[in-house]
């Protein structure tokens, strides 16, 4: 049929179809060709993997594992009953080593396309896959594929969950966590996550499902913390403000910190508790329990606070009392900090989120303590208090402090510490000052402004940028500025105006009755000062009007805004700028008129901004291209110049 259609398109006896139809037919031709190729490949591999020769069979399984990633091939191979063939090969138990590894790899790739339902597999196949996981010594590749298959079975079928749960237990998975292969550890955690997610609620609460030794019990508890199911339950649980047991926890936190009787039924201590405890524990001064009704973090934040108070009592008391003795605006609120920090840690560690196959974060330190998350919180809450002091933060800076703390934690975790103590020592080297240095260094390295060619380009561009800044300053002087007059006795609301002529030859100035709403025309300014007569620009305390007025000598703000223009006969035109911006504009502009360097902070800032933008624009086409440190060598001169065109 396709041959007939194509002959119709190109037949001279019939009217040819449009180019659009031609493109469609060509597309069909190509698609059919690819389909036929994939079908032919599927048929050949289906035959080759049944070869009696082990070498030929191994090569066929390698090709099958690679080809199975293509969904078109996968569809054709599955249509040939290829999945059943692979499962029979696994169930037979005759293959091992690389043969078994590539068989399982091809199986995983084919099933990932979602063409075949997981419910179709037999108990014998499940038992065989589980046996590879339960063996103490197994090929790493086979073990990894087997764990991946078990995870997919559990997640994709509730019926398969029950079958897998009968064949494999948590205790049999734990030994795989004690090895050094992070891929195996990650896949093992993924299987346990899947088992926890699909397990009924009553089974999730069972901590030790089988009798195991102390070391394995420790690892199992750590594993449960790593999977964060228990943390998620606490994070999604609200505190009931009327629940006396939960309120008792808050009273216990107060008692540990202040060593006072905080029994809820003790009416004589209520006012005392309010006066000394609410300051650091709660934003709600009437009922602090309300703070823990938000989810996340829910009750998890209160659990962390209580653990910190009981297991690190000295540090807890020091933080609470230290902040209680500070000024109101400089206190680091313990309750609010704990709640926000717990929420942040849950975000960093993805507590409450479903496991992701694309995430490869692995933190060995969580295997080193039976209460690793709580200890992690204790280290971070002390870091938060330390960073708060280093930043000299106030209550308005709370979010800024939390951002710095997040960066400190993330940078320490990036180094993959092997223990909580190592994590803590890494944080000690990430003070607020060090974070600022790292940020600055990264910005410089990111822009690659340190290489020799870039520095040379900067030097070449800099004069152009400086000329641009100079023209902006002079244009601003041409617009003019209203200045305030200050008498020798007191400040008065008198003004005068000064502006530069458009030809940059004359300064026009004169007194005003009131502050103008817009530009003042040249005609209304009676006084003139030729730029050619200006000898120097004087700033700060060296200005004559600052020396004369003794009262102004102590006024630092006025001193920073004062400047004078010295012209012939040792006369001065004295200025006090309305703000720092105008001061920089005028001193830069006057220095530019005199041919001197513009040195204000405003000029430096403009130079950095404009130069950085210009550099990025010029280097835009060189993104991801390695810039050599040195220019390429100049080639040798040719032996003759006969190749030069002779104009004659």
Image (tube, rainbow, N blue to C red):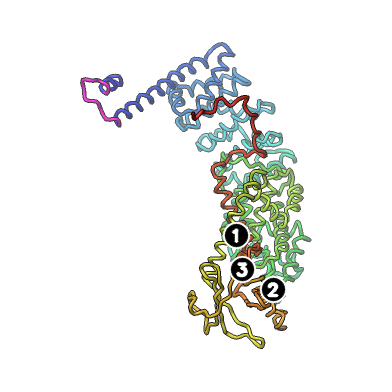
Callout 3–callout 2 Cβ contact below 8 Å:
no
Q: Is residue 257 left or right of residue 527?
A: right
Location of residue 318 (image quadrant): bottom right
Q: Nearer the viewer, residue 266 or 258?
A: 258
Q: Is residue 527 left or right of residue 373?
A: left
Distance of label 2 from label 1 (alpha carbons):
22 Å
Q: Nearer the viewer, residue 523 or 297?
A: 523
Distance of label 3 from label 2 (alpha carbons):
15 Å
Taking 200 as reference, is 510 above or below it? below
Disc 3 designates what residue?
Answer: 590
Location of residue 531 (image quadrant): bottom right
Instruction: Report x, y in % for residue 191.
Output: 60, 37
Residue situated furthest top in the rendering: 52
Disc 2 designates what residue?
Answer: 540
Distance of label 3 from label 1 (alpha carbons):
17 Å
Q: Which mark is in front, 2 or 1?
A: 2
Q: Which mark is in front, 3 or 1?
A: 3
Callout 2–callout 1 Cβ contact below 8 Å:
no
Q: Most prominent secondary structure in the magenta stretch?
A: loop
Instruction: Report x, y in % for residue 429.
Output: 75, 52
Disc 1 designates what residue?
Answer: 606
Can residue 157 be spotted in the picture? yes
Boundaries of the magenta span: 9-19
Looking at the image, which residue is at 60% across and 60% down? Answer: 606
User: Is label 1 in a helix, a strand or a loop?
Assistant: helix
Disc with the residue nearer the chain's start (2 vs 1):
2
Instruction: Report x, y in % for residue 595.
Output: 63, 63
User: Is label 3 in a helix, a strand or a loop?
Assistant: helix
Disc with the residue nearer the chain's start (3 vs 2):
2
Looking at the image, which residue is at 58% across and 58% down? Answer: 467
């Amino acid at each position: 049929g396709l041959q007939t259609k194509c002959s119709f398109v190109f037949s001279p006896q019939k009217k040819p179809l449009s180019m659009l139809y031609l493109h469609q037919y060509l597309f069909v031709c190509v698609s059919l060709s690819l389909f036929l190729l994939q079908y032919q490949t599927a048929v050949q591999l289906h035959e080759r993997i049944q070869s009696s020769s082990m070498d030929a069979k191994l090569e066929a399984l390698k090709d099958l594992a690679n080809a199975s990633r293509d969904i078109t091939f996968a569809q054709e191979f599955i249509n040939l009953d290829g999945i059943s063939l692979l499962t029979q090969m696994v169930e037979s138990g005759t293959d091992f080593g690389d043969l078994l590894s590539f068989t399982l790899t091809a199986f995983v790739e084919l099933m990932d396309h979602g063409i075949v339902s997981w419910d179709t597999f037999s108990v014998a196949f499940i038992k065989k896959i589980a046996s590879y996981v339960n063996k103490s010594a197994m090929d790493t590749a086979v073990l990894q594929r087997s764990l991946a298959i078990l995870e997919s079975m559990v997640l994709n079928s509730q019926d398969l969950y029950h079958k897998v749960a009968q064949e494999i237990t948590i205790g049999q998975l734990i030994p795989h966590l004690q090895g050094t292969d992070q891929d195996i550890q990650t896949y093992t955690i993924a299987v346990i996550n899947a088992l926890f997610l699909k397990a009924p609620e009553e089974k999730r609460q069972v901590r030790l499902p089988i009798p195991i030794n102390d070391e394995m019990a420790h690892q199992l508890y750590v594993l449960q913390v790593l999977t964060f199911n228990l943390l998620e339950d606490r994070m999604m649980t609200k505190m009931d403000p009327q629940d006396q047991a939960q309120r008792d926890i808050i009273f216990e936190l107060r008692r540990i910190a202040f060593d006072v009787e905080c029994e809820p039924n003790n009416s004589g201590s209520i006012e005392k508790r309010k006066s000394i405890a609410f300051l650091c524990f709660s934003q709600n001064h009437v009922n602090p329990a309300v703070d823990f009704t938000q989810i996340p973090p829910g009750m998890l934040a209160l659990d962390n606070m209580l653990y910190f108070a009981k297991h690190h009592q000295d540090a807890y008391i020091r933080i609470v009392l230290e902040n209680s003795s500070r000024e109101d605006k400089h206190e680091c609120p313990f309750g609010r900090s704990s709640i926000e920090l717990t929420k942040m840690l849950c975000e960093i560690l993805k507590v409450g989120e479903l496991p992701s196959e694309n995430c490869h974060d692995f933190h060995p330190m969580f295997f080193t303590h039976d209460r690793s998350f709580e200890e992690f919180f204790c280290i971070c809450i002390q870091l938060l208090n330390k960073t708060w002091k280093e930043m000299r933060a106030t209550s308005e800076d709370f979010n800024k402090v939390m951002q710095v703390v997040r960066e400190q934690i993330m940078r320490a975790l990036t180094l993959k510490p092997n223990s909580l103590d190592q994590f803590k020592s890494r944080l000690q080297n990430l003070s607020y000052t060090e974070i600022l240095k790292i940020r600055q260094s990264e910005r410089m390295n990111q822009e690659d402004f340190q290489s020799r060619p870039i520095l040379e380009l900067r030097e070449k561009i800099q004069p152009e940028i400086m000329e641009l800044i100079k023209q902006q300053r002079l244009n601003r002087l041409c617009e003019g500025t209203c200045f305030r007059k200050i008498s020798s006795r007191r400040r008065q609301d008198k003004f005068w105006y000064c502006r530069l002529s458009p030809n940059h030859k004359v300064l026009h100035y004169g007194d005003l009755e009131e502050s103008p709403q817009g530009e003042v025309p040249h005609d209304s300014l009676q006084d003139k000062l030729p730029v050619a007569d200006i000898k120097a620009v004087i700033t700060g305390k060296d200005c004559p009007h600052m020396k004369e007025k003794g009262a102004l000598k102590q006024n630092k703000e006025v001193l920073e805004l004062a400047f004078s223009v010295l012209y012939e006969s040792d006369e001065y035109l004295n200025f006090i700028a309305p703000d720092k911006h105008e001061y920089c504009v005028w001193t830069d502009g006057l220095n530019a008129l005199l041919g001197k360097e513009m040195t204000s902070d405003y000029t430096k800032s403009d130079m950095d901004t404009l130069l950085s933008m210009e550099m990025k624009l010029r280097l835009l086409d060189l993104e991801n291209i390695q810039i050599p440190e040195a220019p390429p060598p100049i080639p040798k001169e040719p032996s003759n110049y006969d190749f030069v065109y002779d104009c004659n």
